[in-house]
Image (cartoon, helix red, strand yellow):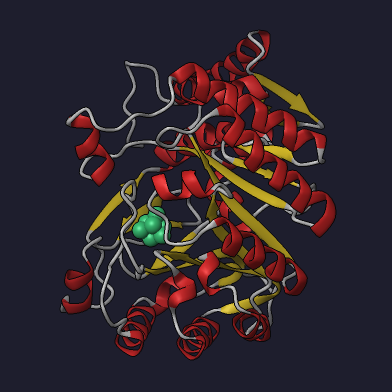
Amino acid sequence: MRAGESTRELGVYVHIPFCETLCPYCDFAVSVQREIPHQAYVDRVKAEIAARAREFEGHRAVTIYFGGGTPSLLHVEALAELLAAVREAVVVDPGVEITLEANPNQLSAPNLEAWRALGIERLSVGCQSFNDRHLKALRRNHDRARALAGVERALAVMERVSIDLMFGGPGQTLSEWEEDLGEMQRLVEERGLSHVSAYNLTVEPGTAFWIRQKRGRLKLPEEDLSATMLERLGERAREVGLWRYEVSNYARAGAESRHNSGYWLRRPYVGLGVGAHGLAVAADGRSRRRSNTRRYRAYMEQGDPGAPQSEERLSPRESFVEHLFLGARSRLGLDVGALLESYAAVLSPRDEVRVWETLRELAGLGLMEEVQGLWRPTLRGLDLGDTVAERLFEAGSPEPSEGLSE
Ligand code: SF4
């Protein structure tokens, strides 16, 4: 079958869990090893691809995303082998977006050229900051000079580059954050940076920061200061033409991450590797979420290479509800009329009225808006995303007298 011929769009996510050190705030599925077992991991993921071959049938990959961990630590030959295995398993769209997450330490000219030659056209670089004091406080293993030089080299070679920034780290001041935003603006204006993901540091249970916080030895900026940092980020991104299209993502129009947008638009995706998640959607509206074990050794040694650690089956009605409230998480816009139509078999006229009434109510509160026939949260609605999602969840769910599993 040729690409585009009656196939459904699919995202492919490949998790590469290796990192050189464990960052004290990290809650991802990560494995820190003296020697990275490149070939063993590639062989294991290839076995998973083979075992799950049926999940690729009838689809064409529109995005392939290598996330981590630190995928840029993987040898180029290993990446090439994984990409070839994906291309063999699924039809790949000619316009596919292929992204690699990279640490600034690996952004050498030879690496960049080799990745480009593999067809990787988008890099997501984990800078976090350009301030040496802040980078040290976050225990990152790169410094300002490496981050800046690496990003500039990447921008010269890659078609699209995104940087990750983090605010609200230990002892961070507003002026340090303004410095980071200044570098961000310069990279956009002078070097063509087109995408920024910016996260407020959150302290996850079980991390080193969490332990320090419990012992009273972690000083983070007050909530008010973090809110000001977020506000300044929005203002300075806008000044250089980046629009906020999702809670933490800012891009030039047209440079949005197609892979991550798929999560909000509920496009099916296959997640491969340690800790990877996936979503399968059947033609009748039922769907299935699954995830692999987050433990490296368990993943490497499990008997059935395609077996998930957990699986959740969603009825068409539950799938509809999820689709509706996920749409409130990004500003890409949701065609609510088309969505209601595609789930008409499980919705009553009264259900549809409740959805429209809720949207109008949220619009009245300044939290949602309709733009060119698509519904999306306003910037305020994005900041109050949990409230909006909760209201949409209620609006889409059956009324208490009905059941949810239809
Ligand atoms: S580099 Fe990223 S994935 Fe690796 S430990 Fe640090 S935060 Fe976690």
| Residue 276 vertical placement versus 16 (above, below) | above
Give the camera-side residue of 113 and 153.
153
- Quadrant location of the N terminus? bottom right
- Please give the name of the residue rendered at 36% of the width and 76% of the height, measured from the top-left corner: 52
Task: Please tell me in which quarter of the rendered image ligand 1 is found.
Answer: bottom left
Question: Can residue 371 be spotted in the picture?
Answer: yes
| Residue 85 vertical placement versus 355 (above, below) | below
- Please give the name of the residue rendered at 20% of the width and 44% of the height, measured from the top-left corner: 206
Please indicate whether residue 280 sits to the left or right of residue 357 in the image: left
Q: How many labels, in total?
A: 0
- Please give the name of the residue rendered at 80% of the width and 47% of the height, measured from the top-left corner: 253
- Quadrant location of the C terminus? top left
Quadrant of the rendered structure where residue 78 is? Answer: bottom left
Please indicate whether residue 217 sits to the left or right of residue 330 in the image: left
| Residue 256 vertical placement versus 79 (above, below) | above
Give the camera-side residue of 319 and 215.
215
| Residue 208 vertical placement versus 291 (above, below) | above
- Please give the name of the residue rendered at 24% of the width and 70% of the height, measured from the top-left corner: 307
Residue 375 spot, x, y in % from top left: 69, 29
Please indicate whether residue 185 sits to the left or right of residue 98 in the image: right
